[in-house]
Amino acid sequence: MFRTIKGIEMRLTKDDKGWGFPGQIVTHDYDKLKVWAQTEPVPEQVALDIFVKYLAKNLKRNTINQSHSSYGLKHKVEELSKEIQKHDPDYQYEYIGNEDFIIAMLQHGFDIRSTGGLSPNYYFNIKTIDSHKMWKELMVKEYLDERQRTRTTN
């Protein structure tokens, strides 16, 4: 079952709260997605913000990379969230939705391409993250440094 929200076709999905919308993004109209991403708020998610900013600064490339889909990358954000939690007892683990990841990537200027068919997943113009050794450690350090700066300015 599908529904259109703000011109974006969404698939009815089930989560821990039951069936509902919005669910998976299933449109492959890049222009609609780009416009939607600029107006759609992404819930504040520390790990997602750090991850996407890191990709934008260090791993952006000119061509689409089919090594990592949005679904696989959102799991990397969740890995980062778990790693941050090990270093900061006040930090709460964050679940990252695939659509939140896609929106965040579009908001940071990444290009996307559908993985094909009715799949809700996308590829992006990023380098292969696994080739960038220590990505998790560098992002955790960024989080801890930012947290320290915030504490000293308050």
Image (cartoon, rainbow, N blue to C red):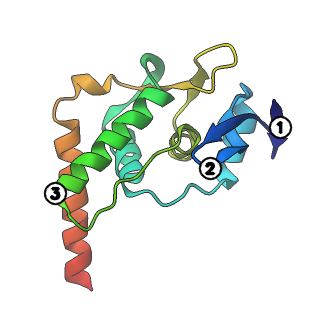
Which image quadrant: the C terminus? bottom left
Q: Position of residue 119 (x, y in %)?
A: 63, 20
Amino acid found under the numbered disc labelled 3: His
Asked if the residue at tag 1 contacts the one at tag 2, i.e. Cβ–Cβ closer than 8 Å, the answer is no
Give the residue number, with chain letter if any, for mark 3.
87
Number of dots carrying numbers: 3
Name the foreground residue: 101 vs 63: 101
Q: Quadrant of residue 115?
A: top right
Q: Position of residue 123 (x, y in %)?
A: 51, 23
Q: Earlier in the sequence, mark 2 or mark 1?
A: 1
Position of 59 with respect to 136 (left or right) is right
Q: Position of residue 22 (x, y in %)?
A: 71, 44
Image: 113 above or below 20 = above
Amino acid found under the numbered disc labelled 2: Lys
Position of 64 with respect to 140 (left or right) is right
Give the residue displayed 33% in from the left and 44% down from the top.
54
Amino acid found under the numbered disc labelled 1: Arg
Q: CA distance from mark 2 to mark 3?
A: 30 Å
The kind of secondary structure element at disc 2 is loop
Q: Residues within 10 Å of mark 3 (few under 14, many from 20)?
A: few
Give the residue number, with chain letter if any, for mark 1.
3
Give the residue number, with chain letter if any, for mark 2.
17
